Image: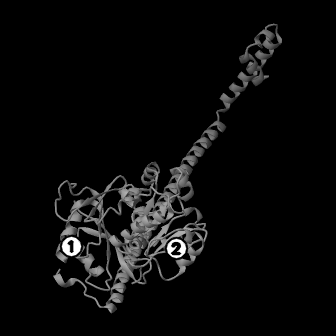
Amino acid sequence: MGGALVTDPVLVYVGGDPAAGERVRLPEGCAAISGEDICDAARRPERPCALVILDPNTLPPGGLPERWWGVPVGLALPLGEDAAALIRRFGDALLEHLDRFDRIAVRDPEVWRALSAGYGWDEEQRVECAEADPGTLAARLCDSVREVVKRWGPSAKGIHRARAAAFERFLSACRTRFEGEAAVQICPPDNRWGQLLSRNGLKLRVAGAKDPAPGEEPGGSFGLVLGEDLLQGRTPGELESLIQKMWRLARPGGSLVFFGDFVFPQGRGMSVRWFVRLVMEATERRVLLEHVEALKYPEEEMYRGGFLAFSRLGP
Amino acid sequence: MPEDDFYTPTDADALRMENELLAFEVEFLRARYADRERAIAEVRREAEESVERKVRRRVRNATADLRRQLAETRKRLEEAREAATIDPGRKAHLERAEKDIVLLLNMISSGPAGPLLRLKPAFRELERRYL
């Protein structure tokens, strides 16, 4: 299984001029890149663990090659421009592609407020940059993207993007079914699905493993119940009780959505057939399998992820 | 389900697991494709039946219209026949009455009251009809 390592360098795009790399003092473990080199680098087999863009003005036409969106991106937005101007210039090519795993350096709080509200970014994604010195800015952005890689792993963003693409297709295929509904994720590691679900008109809440958790919504009221990576570190018994809880949280006709890995090069895992059987047993066959999709993550040769959706039957 | 249903794979097992995942997806898609085919066939059959029902209704309505028109035509034909077979005595009487009207109208219209009466539309209509 491919993918970058935490120890791989962070690539820093310093601008269109190759000499700019010499003018910016980069922190240790970072490599400067400039001009069209960014497209050449995307074609090479080795991949950095993250990418930092110091000068988005000079990016080649068409923005970043698709491959770069699989790694965390740190973006320094130009100073002295308001939110509307930034959206006009970078909206389609850059800003729309940024998700929870990316970091953005914006000096003006007003600009940050407008952009984060428009694109659904979290406060956690903002990188403070009071100084205009490119070296300091590069160091801050490099640290923040390295932190992302350390916290979630080098492949987390690519995995999330592959899952998000499948989830988006599923949601758009049954858009009218979830109109005005609430979604709940069980045992989430963070709020990574909030942005996508709110874009599709669903407000995301969270639920713990214990039933009922304090302040939790009553059961049977959610149109969509999401469980991601529930297989890891749980016994079949624990998994069964989580599935039962998910079933109770979903309203009749609502969807139980699972993302997980069913191919394990190391460690212990569960076959997809066993998982489906477990869901059927845990819910006493009061679900209907409505979607199955094998997922191939970026930079990997094998399909190892699975996206399964069940429709809840019964009162 | 027993506790040891988890895989403990070797490297070679990864391929088998991937194969199982893809096979399951294919199986699911085939089943869904078959369901859709069945649904499409069902919709097609219903559409054909609906068209057939519409055509039958139209044929029924057209037949009823033709029958009604035929009955009306027959009725008109009967009336025309009745009119053609009128009593000869009555026919002579009506012809005499018509001649009398023509005579009277000639007298009135050529008399001094003629121009005055011609101001009335009803009189003009009588002149048009009989003179």
Determine whether A95 is above or below B2 in the image: above
Which mark is on residue A32? 2
Tell me the crowding category of disc 1: few under 14, some 14 to 19, or many 20 or more residues within 10 angstroms, Cα based.
Answer: many
Q: Which residue position is annotated with label 1?
A: A239
| Residue at the outermost top position | B112
Q: Confirm or deny contact between disc 2 and disc 1 (CB under 8 A).
A: no
Q: Could you tell me which chain the residue with mark 1 belongs to?
A: A
Tell me the crowding category of disc 2: few under 14, some 14 to 19, or many 20 or more residues within 10 angstroms, Cα based.
Answer: many
Q: Quadrant of the C terminus of chain B?
A: top right
Q: Quadrant of the N terminus of chain B?
A: bottom left
**How many discs mark residues in the rendered view?**
2
Which mark is on residue A28? none
Q: Could you tell me which chain the residue with mark 2 belongs to?
A: A
Determine whether B25 is above or below B94 in the image: below
The kind of residue on which mark 2 rests is: Ala
Residue B125 position by quadrant:
top right
Residue positioned 61% across, 41% down in the render:
B76
Q: Position of residue A98 (x, y in %)?
A: 45, 63
Determine whether B116 is above or below A159 in the image: above
Q: Position of residue A77 (x, y in %)?
A: 50, 58
**Near-viewer residue (B77 or A286):** A286
Q: Position of residue A242 (x, y in %)?
A: 21, 68
